[in-house]
Image (cartoon, rainbow, N blue to C red):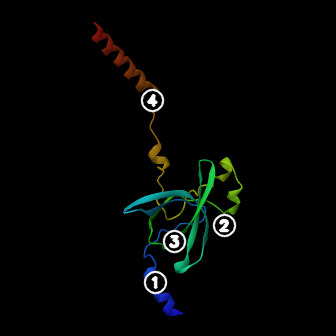
Amino acid sequence: MNEIREIEKEYMKKRVRHFHVGDTVKVHLRVKEGERERVQVFEGTVIAMKGGSINESFTVRKISYGVGVERVFPLHSPLIKKIDIKRKGDVRRAKLYYLRERVGKGIVVKEKVGVPGEDSEQPKPEETKVEQPKAEETKAENTEQKAENTDQKS
């Protein structure tokens, strides 16, 4: 049994992004068309993960022109160039197959807010605070500007 795991380790990717069911991901996939090779992006919600070791796979669902499209990707496939996590989902299920029956905004998974240990891209409340000038200062500035405008006209 250990011999099989040794062989499987050779084919497993060393560094894999950790994502979970409910996350919105972008899967960059190598596609070969004739002699050319290009990267195709599939963006959607992860609705299932199954298997383990070299057999681990995940299912991504997206809506394309009003039609639901699901695709199963082997996690350690050499055709997957990279996986970008767009947003973390807050779900309480291991499989989100119930999203297949949902329509419109019912498909959207809640976003996980304040994930510990991760850098949030949103600015902190202290950074967004803008000091408002006092009313006296703005009146003084307005009178100075009016004085300058009248000097320029004459």
The percent position of residue 135, horizontal first and vertical second, equals 46, 26
Seen as rendered, the residue at the extreme front is 34
Name the residue beneath numbered marker 1: 9
Q: Dot 4 corresponds to which residue?
A: 134
First-in-chain label (4 vs 3):
3
Position above or below: 21 against 150: below
Q: How far apart are marks 4 and 3 (CA)?
A: 58 Å
Q: Which amino acid does label 1 sit on?
A: Lys
Do the residues under discs 3 and 1 have CB atoms within 8 angstroms?
no
Tag 2 residue: 95
Q: Which of marks 2 and 3 is nearer the N terminus?
A: 3
* Residue at figure coordinates x 67%, y 47% from the top left: 104
Graded by Cα atoms within 10 Å as few (under 14), some (14 to 19) or many (20 or more), the crowding at tag 1 reads few
Q: Position of residue 30 (x, y in %)?
A: 43, 64
- Front disc: 4 or 1: 1
User: Pointer 3: what residue?
Assistant: 75
> Label 1's element?
helix
Q: Is mark 2 on a helix, strand or loop?
A: loop
Question: Disc 3 or 1, which lies upstream in sequence?
Answer: 1
Mark earlier in primary sequence (2, 4)? 2
- Left or right? Give the position of 109 relative to 101: left
Dividing the picture into quadrants, the one containing residue 50 is bottom right
Q: Which amino acid, by three-letter code, is at mark 4?
A: Lys
